[in-house]
Image (tube, coloured by chain):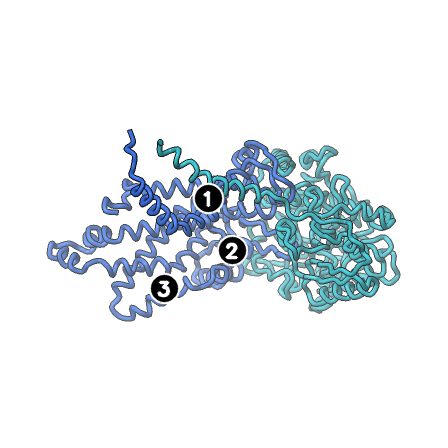
Amino acid sequence: MPRTHRRAPALLVPLLLCAGLLLSGCANPGRGSADDDPTRPVTLRFWHGWSEKNEVKAVDAAIARFEELHPNIRVKSTGNVSDATVNQALRAGGGDAPDVVSSFTTDNVGQYCSSGMWADLDPFMKKSGLDKEKVFPKTLLSYTSYKGTQCALPLLADAYGLYYNKDAFEKAGITRPPRTMSEFREDAVKLTERTSGGSYKQLGFMPDFRLYQNSPDRLLAQWGPKYFDADGKARLAESPETAEFFTVQRDLIRAQGGYGPLERFRTTFGDEMSSQNAFLTGKLAMHMDGEWRGLMLNEAEPSFRWGTAPMPVPDDRADTYGRGYLTGTVAGIAHSSKHQNAAWELLKFLTADTEQVVAFANAIHNIPSTNAALASPKLDRDPAFRTFLDIAANPRSTGMPPSVNGGQYIVSLRDFSFDVEAGRVHDLAKGLRALDRQIDDDNLQSRN
Amino acid sequence: MAIPLAPELRRKRTRERLRTLGFLSPWLVGFTVFFGYPLLATVYFSFMHYNQIQSPTFVGLRNWRYVLEQMPLFGPALWNTLWLVVVMVALRVAFGLGIGLLVTKVKTGAGFFRTAFYLPYLAPPVAATVAFVFLLNPGTGPVNEALSAVGVSAPNWFNDPDWAKPSLVLLSLWGIGDLMVIFMASLLDVPKEQYEAAELDGAGAFAKFRYVTWPSIVPIVMFAVVTGVVQTMQYYTQALVAGKLASGVSIGPGTVIQPGYPDHSTLTVPQLVYSLGFQNFNTGAACVLSLVLFAIAMAVTSLLMRKRAGLLTAED
């Protein structure tokens, strides 16, 4: 018998083993069900990203209120969970996977909805008689759904506005916060103070995109560009607002000393969430940030008086003043949850119960995410916070549209913006067309 | 024509084969589970669309086209990885050998110097990187303050795309202890008689190194180069931490770390594999990248292992 024939069975064993392993590797993670009885005793797992002491306390208080209303449901919460952990855990599909999940960013909603990783919530809302159009503001609903699938609901929102140093304004002879981009540039220059060594003592406004919350998508919201057309094709190059935005940003950089010196000055800033935050230490006279910064400033008691206002808008659209960038925490039900009806009870309570939403918003100084809570008299009336409530209520305020590959297109926009601010993009129109192509290629790659 | 074997002899051979297989089986199982299967699975998934939730679907060469033609980060990541492989490995081997030679020649305080050069290697990579980013901070770091105090215009180190990779090389040279130890051991192992004979022949320091030391330590240099290449192909942590810290971008829960700051100059292929595979869940493209990396690592290693590369002698 030829030797090759005798080898065949020996080779077959490892090959079959590999093929078996390969196929088992393709198996989907465990599927959940919505057949459970929400009145039966059950323990739910709730994963969220909050980690600060006051935040965890607020989450615990919310759970205590829920458990009082639903004595049969116990909730085990886990904080400080990142999107990456949620993504990986739900894909791994272990027995301890969460039932209710939340994310601090709206970037991944498109991915959650299109992949089925977060369950479609419309059937649950229909069963409960919850009219989402009436309960939630339109912008918040748009960033929690993708192509008609509502797989998430807003769990408080974040609005972005301008923080400014009132003492610095007074010293520079500025009487009110800027409303247009021309005023913004003028004020930024007036507020900038240099050191004898050529660096900065105080900067009017740091326009560089890598500073804290300064990402281009947030600043671009003041122009309200069109990211995608009806077919989902990227349209940033065709939207004149995009080019205008980059031109204004480059002008702000030039007017305050140039990209190199500004970036070097940025390296002297402390961590965003620390007492060495550049606005808190007086290195920045104006600063874009979310509503939560107000609570932090109150606690830190800086050595100057500060105020809040909406971010300025383009000169030719001065009537849109008051708009801003909106985002927020989103929550949903894990596809692998075996207790989806009970999970819905918790999700409904956290996102749509007016009393709960107001209490939670007041506790962690976030924007409430339902129409009823926004109008509630129990809501914190702090004037600095009021600015952000108004930005959230402004019909021109926008969030980022969800995409099939999550925040990949925002990453591409940021990468392009870093090149623009550094002066590496010489033909902006050509660069924007290439960016659109890149976003389309990435989206196509993510589709099945 | 095969000669039929006696039944007794055949049974003996079968027993021997089974015994050999028994001794080999732990390795065979490990190789199959941890190398064979992952490699086959990687090839399989490189032709599939798979987001790790829905069932994989066959997409032909789409993932390959995407990575090789449409993904703008592939070029910079590959360039950075190859740059680090060439520059970092070469400098680490040369520096490790230099320090090894130095500590074997020192007459007094040899123990102190050996410990001093080895200690940095024991620092956890993340802690060492954090310390380097702090020391080399262009705005507040003590290194730039000291340099500007003596009138030297200091670079922006990890914040400058032209200096970020050299800064990582600097960090790797600081932790040279691992190579120093193996070079020191190999240098101490060179027979003293050969040096004495060379001295009698009138050889100078360079000639002694060229004709006595080098031939003796070549296998160790080979080991250092090959393991260095393989390790640098997998370079991930230090570049990621340095980029993240130097960028100054706050990373809160829910925020995805984008590697490569500044301007993708510290982006490496393993970072891109992780981003694609476990942040974007673009499994197919991540598998393509892994296979490209595997092919390059195999090619470079084979090239180095060839006798003609000069690092292996006939005896090796």
Q: Earlier in the sequence, mark 3 or mark 2?
A: 3
**Protein chain holding label 1:** B
Residue B240: image x %, image y %? 52, 53
Residue A134 in view, yes or no: yes
Question: Who's cyan, chain-wise?
Answer: A
Q: CA distance from mark 3 to mark 1?
A: 39 Å
Q: Label 1, on which residue?
A: B36
Amino acid type, mark 1: Gly
Amino acid type, mark 2: Ala
Amino acid type, mark 3: Phe
Foreground residue, A173 or A261?
A261
Q: Secondary structure at mark 2?
A: helix
Task: Name the mark nearer the viewer: 3 or 1.
Answer: 1
Q: Residue furthest front?
A: B7
Residue A286: image x %, image y %? 69, 57
Q: Secondary structure at mark 1?
A: helix
Marks 3 and 1 belong to one chain: yes
Q: Colour of chain B?
A: blue
Foreground residue, A268 or A78?
A78
Which mark identifies residue A342?
none
Residue under the image location 87 percent in, 56 percent down: A375
Q: Earlier in the sequence, mark 2 or mark 1?
A: 1
Q: Earlier in the sequence, mark 3 or mark 1?
A: 1
Foreground residue, B198 or A9?
A9
From the image, which quarter does the N terminus of chain A lie in?
top left
Q: Label 2, on which residue?
A: B242
Residue A220 in view, yes or no: no
Q: Is residue A143 rendered to the left or right of residue A439?
A: right
Q: Label 3, on which residue?
A: B117
